[in-house]
Structure formats: structure tokens, C-alpha cells
Image (spheres, rainbow, N blue to C red):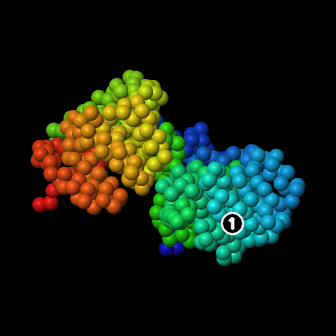
Amino acid sequence: MVSTRLGKILLVCNAYLLMHCPQASADSTNGCSRSYAPSDATITRKTTIEPTRVLGRIPRLSLVPIAHVRGELFLKDEILFGQPTMSLLKSEGIVAEKGRHESHLVLGSGSLLLAPKNTIDISVPNAEINVAAGAIVYIRTKGNNTAILNLHDDRVNAVNVLSAHTRYYLPPGRVMLVTEDRYTDFDNANPCPGLWYKTVYTHESTEGITRLVSQFSPLSAAWILPSVRHLILNRSSHGNKIMKTCAAVTVMSRDHKQFRYKLDDHERGPVLLVSGKLQSQNDEETNTLETWKTNVQGNSRGDELISLLDATNEKLSQDATDADSLYLRGYLYDVVGCTTWAIQDLSKAIEKNEDFADAYKERGICYMDNKNFDEAMKDLNHALELDPTSGDALLARGRLYMLTSQPDAALTDLTRCTEESVKFAPVLPGEMPGNFYNAPEYYLSNCYKALGDEDKAKEHLEKAQVSDNQSAVPDTDYLHRFADKPAEAQPSQ
């Protein structure tokens, strides 16, 4: 136990040195956080990366002090929201109004780093935040999404949030996201992209407000938030408090799950932090692919698919912008489970061919698998605009409507999936059409059940369980696509 805690303390100290001493990260490659990750999707052997080595490859924080960034402001000491402060907020592009008293602010849009010596209240969309004297809190509001980060406090319940008639107390190292999007996850609701987080708890209200509470890394806040970075680089008293909190949170946490953050879908990521070790999600994708290869090798269909992947990689090595090859590889990656790589290839295919309906459809399915429902809906809608007879896109959008509690809309798409004019187009060798096992009937059964029509639900479930195709293809050769053969739709023995 002692050695483990000591290791964590050394890890934080090393990170602190990296931010203050240029020589501490002399082995970094142009400051790139992903310099150790492959630049393309070819298979590479996973390597073990030591903690100090990895931290040396984190983008080193700028050594030039940053006074402020427009839209983000640091307020400290006795904070009163009188005319001078309001004028300063306006000059920085922060949308705010005076509140009920001189220590109350209504924040509409922008970012504030607060270190008050008096208790203050901040109103944001769908939440009221109370910050006690001595706490250091970062608040960012963008649209209907707000992030509240407790970077430091010196007493219990110093930071509390009232939202949807419920009060939450945020300890140091915790972040709360408040959003009006009921069907979202941390990445999509987070207005601070790049923040390392883990163990998310979701609280939904009858008013349609969602609160997501998670542990975050104060070190990552110093990385991505200019005002926090400024405090630490200047070695101010507030910066020192944040770093001490970072060390305390790291050492005292009993949660050994991975810290993670989301990068842009076109980038390799996210990066994971586990007990002082960083690992690229690229390694996870590589492991997934290698495991799949191991499992299918020796099977005639599996060998054929591996050869197809190798041939596609060869084509892309000669022409990295070949849209058809990018789509084919992205499709196979999605089937295998390498969703991040799939999105990257499909995005490149769309950049090359903006009317590539199948690429939009497949990327929409990937987004749906990642629970990025807004982006999934955009892609599937566009896919159906380009190809209204795509059964795969209709089935995917019908499932998406069900996931987002819209059974009426789902009913329309799923019913269309049963029409003869709608076509399901398998892509890979050995792959069966998406309706081969009567998957639309299974989802229609769920849809009618959600609508309260039990008779219709039973009728369609029976259709899903009866098919002339049930034994047409051996299981060893069936290339499984998500939801093509729902377990519940298989006939009982």
C-alpha cells in the first residue's frame, strides 16, 4: 500500500516538473501526445510504455504565461459583481447579468475560474452553483451545457449545485455536467473537451434535465484550460493549491478505473491513464483486431476476410484517399469492433465523396454504437436522403429511434424495412443481408410493445422467430453484424 501511494505521488510530481521544467520533457517529439501511436490503421505490435516515458510525451504546457483568453476569465479575492466586474466580463465576450445580490451572477455563456474569499452564487442554465470562500472552481457554459469543476476547497460541502430540485455536493476532483439532452453521454455533454474523466454517474429528472457527475484529473484541467494553466505556470498560491489537490486526489482515490478523454473523431484517441500508466486507445483497437484475427484464422471465411483486409491496406498504401477502399476497410473495422478506426476511415471516404450514402450509413451506425446519438441521426438522415431505399439505413435509424424513446418514428422506418422496394446490401464475403434473420420483425415487436399494443408485439415476435433461413448458413461462416440476429429473435429449442 505504501509503495503504491508513493508511486502515485512520484507520478504527480513528475507531471508537475513537466509543466515547469523544459528539460523534464526533452524526449518528447514535437510536443505530440500521440507520437507513439501509428499514423495510420496498420497493425503494430503493442509496446509497454513506462509512466515517465509516457508523461514526457504529453503536450508540454506552454512556458509563456497566459494572462487570459477571450471568453475565459479568472476572478479572485473579494468577488462582487458590480459595474466594473460586469464591464470586464462583457469586454471578454462573456455573456452574463447581475443576479439577486452583489455576490450573485447569472452566467449565460463563457468560462470563469473563481477563487473567492467570500461566498458567491452563480446561476447557469438549469442549475444554481454555490461556491464557498477558499474554493477554486472552474465553470464553463456553452449553449445548454455547463461543466462545473471543483479544483480545490478547504472544507466539506464548499461547492454545491442545485439542479432540478436536487442539491449535489461536489468534492475536489469532481465535475458535474448539466445538460438538457436526455440521451447523451459524458463526451457529448462536456463543453471542456480533453478533460480526463472516469466513473460517470448519470442523474435524470422528470423535467428533462440530465446531470452527469464524474471524477476528473486536475492535471488534465491544467493541460486544457488556459486560466488554470496560467495559475500553475506562474507558481501562484492558487496554482499550488490546485497541484496539491491533484496529488491528494491521485493518492487517496480508491477508484482504479481508467481516466479517459475524447479527441476529435478524425484523431487517434482517447488517451487512458491507469495507476500512472498511459495507454492509447489505438492499442485497444489493435488488440481487438489482433484478437479477431487469431479467432478466425484457419476458418475459410476468416482467412478470406484477413486477405481482403491485407489487400485493402495495400491499396490504401498506394492511394490513401481511395474512397471505396476506405469505406471497405471502415466497414470491416466496424464489424470487427474497431469503431474508432472505422469512423476515421469512413470520415475520410466522405471527405473524398460527399455523396457516399453507404459511408454515411455506416458511420451513423458507428456513432450509434458509441452512443453519440445526435451525430448518428445526422448521418443516417443524410444517408436516406441520398438513398431512400437503403434497408440497412432504415433499420439502423429505426433502432436509433427506439434507443431515443421515439417508437412512433421507429415504427415508420421498421415497417418500411419489410417492403420489397427496400434493399439490404451485404458488403463482405459471407455476410448475410441485414434482414436475413427477420431482424426488422423483432424490432417491430419491441416498437409495438413500447406503444402498448401487446397483440401486435406478439405477432411480430412470432414472425421474427420463424424463418426459412434459420439453418441456411452455418454459424461458423455467418459474419455477424450487430442486431442482424437478435438473441431474443432466435427460436426457442
Q: Residue at x 49, y 38 (%)?
A: 266
Count numbered badges in the picture.
1
Q: Position of residue 113 (x, y in %)?
A: 73, 57
* Mark 1: secondary structure: strand
Left or right: residue 290 compared with residue 18: left
Q: Quadrant of the C terminus?
A: bottom left
Q: Residue at x 14, y 45 (%)?
A: 469
Q: Is residue 266 visible?
A: yes
Q: Residue at x 65, y 63 (%)?
A: 127
Q: Which residue is mark 1?
A: 129
Q: Residue at x 82, y 63 (%)?
A: 79
Q: Quadrant of residue 31?
A: top right
Q: Nearer the viewer, residue 20 or 252?
A: 252
Q: Quadrant of residue 171?
A: bottom right
Q: Nearer the viewer, residue 445 or 132?
A: 445
Q: Position of residue 146 (x, y in %)?
A: 63, 56
Q: Nearer the viewer, residue 236 or 333?
A: 333
- Type of amino acid under label 1: Ile
Q: Is residue 277 visible?
A: no
Left or right: residue 109 compared with residue 410: right
Q: Is residue 254 above or below residue 224?
A: below
- Residue furthest toward the top? 318
Left or right: residue 395 compared with residue 243: left
Q: Position of residue 258 (x, y in %)?
A: 47, 59
- Few, some or many C-alpha atoms within 10 Å of disc 1 (few <14, some 14-19, many ≥20)? many
Q: Nearer the viewer, residue 95 or 154?
A: 95
Q: Is residue 160 above or below residue 95?
A: below
- Residue furthest toward the bottom? 156
Q: Position of residue 430 (x, y in %)?
A: 19, 37
